[in-house]
Amino acid sequence: MKKQVLLFLITIPQLLIAGGPIASNAIVPKYIEGNSPTNNSRVPFYFWGEVSGLTPNATYHFYCAMDTANPSTSSNGAGLPYLINPVSTVIRRVLNPTMTANTGYDSLVADNTGQLKGWFGVEPTGSARFTPGTILFPKIMLNNGAGGTSVASRINFDLNPVTVLSFGTTAMSPTQGSAIFDSLNAAPKNFICIYDNTTATGRPIAIAIVENDGLMIKHFGTTAMFYKIKVDSLDYHWGTIIPNNLPNGIRALEERSFLTGFPIDTTIDADGIWCYGTNTVNMTNGSQNALYLNTTFVLSSSVVYQDSTYTGVLNAYAVSSNSPNATYAWDYGDSNIGTGANTTHAYNSAGTYILQIIISTGGCSDTISQTIIVESSAGIFTLSPLVFQLIPNPTNGEIFITTKHQGNKNVCLNNLLGQVVFSQVISGTKININLNGQAPGIYILTLTDIETGKTGVQKIILE
């Protein structure tokens, strides 16, 4: 580990411990957003840093930055510091970092062992250091711990390389990343460490702060648009950039304390495809279409069905869930299957069947099983067809279905290829459907009364 030695005479009463300050521990993410010479999609970068070898109980002025490997001994790096004060809990964005004015630095107090620790932030700028693909390292600038107005120590975190990523949509690109955000139920100003493993070990992929952190950056034209709209100043939200080349996806979110840096809670997903349906494996959405992780989402579903029926009767089934990303798979228990939120099915043989519906978002699923009793309709009744009218027909798009049956009816519209172009359970004696956007031609409309099982079929001509 690289050590920095002070090369000037110290005439102040507080002396640094022999050997000088060094980076003793850190939690540094692997990636940072960047672009050069112009960067108008900036996302804050955060890390936890610990420095030892300081004067015990001394107050040090500091600011932070990012720098390349083996920088000159006088290099103060690049990027705008986010100065985080653990006492006041205030976070400041600094345009002109300096030790000569208190607007350009903040202060931390070393403990009685001469150690200083805390969270640090950097906003990537258009500096050449933030060229995509460049490897950077966090660094902290300190004064002498005795009111000095110049940088006395530059602490380089040399064991924590950080790769610069620009936002982009190229699959598997080693220099491009995509935007992701969430509304995890975590405390404001705590930090979310994002991992591609379920044990939350090793270095995180990214670190984000939980809003509202009191630092409003949405008004700056250089802040990434998704961060302005979907993250900044919104309670419980956080957002960041993750690499497009991420075969494991995001598998763990670890909340860490603003004050101590200690872990508080961890949310885990086994395969990187979260319950809401967000797939974080090798994302390619760039910054324009930030993906919503929605880690607090819990899938819930319900099904409408008839638990008893007769052979040959076409029954309508409907399922719904709270997920816009859900798919629906039906197993009627008689070797027949179906898909979609609304289906119809007739049993040909009497008996007891287990109707099963699987509702899946890709990240989690619900399975609903119901018992269906089917009795033989032989010699019992013959269903008359369901009578209804279509007005107007032919139609330019909008069409009204009128019938005497008040209850729930399954409306299913197929084209001549047998493809379903409309399917919905609707109640009432007058039903309105709109075919605008469909290709002109002939369509077959099937109307099934869910309670009686009566079915009617008519032809629609769309002009």
Image (cartoon, rainbow, N blue to C red):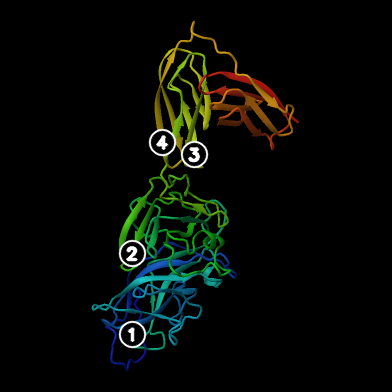
Of labels 1 and 2, the one closer to you: 2
Identify whether 178 is placed above or below 336.
below
Q: Is residue 159 left or right of residue 170?
A: left
Closer to the chain start, of discs 1 and 2, is 1
Q: In x, y percent, where is residue 80?
A: 49, 74
Report crowding for label 2: few under 14, some 14 to 19, many 20 or more residues within 10 A (C-alpha): some
Q: CA distance from mark 4 to mark 2?
A: 34 Å
Q: What amino acid does circle 1 point to?
A: Gly
Quadrant where the N terminus sits is bottom left
Q: What amino acid does circle 4 point to?
A: Asp
- Kindly identify which numbered label has been placed on residue 145: 1
Question: Which residue is identified by label 3?
Answer: 326
Closer to the chain start, of discs 3 and 4, is 3
Which SS class for mark 3? loop
Q: What amino acid does circle 3 point to?
A: Ala
Which SS class for mark 2? loop
Quadrant where the C terminus sits is top right
Q: In x, y percent, where is residue 371?
A: 39, 22
In the depicted view, which residue is nearer to us: 202 or 59? 59
Q: Is residue 12 left or right of residue 433?
A: left
Question: Which residue is identified by label 4?
Answer: 366
Question: Which residue is identified by label 2?
Answer: 257
Q: CA distance from mark 3 to mark 1?
A: 58 Å
Q: Is residue 37 left or right of residue 306?
A: right
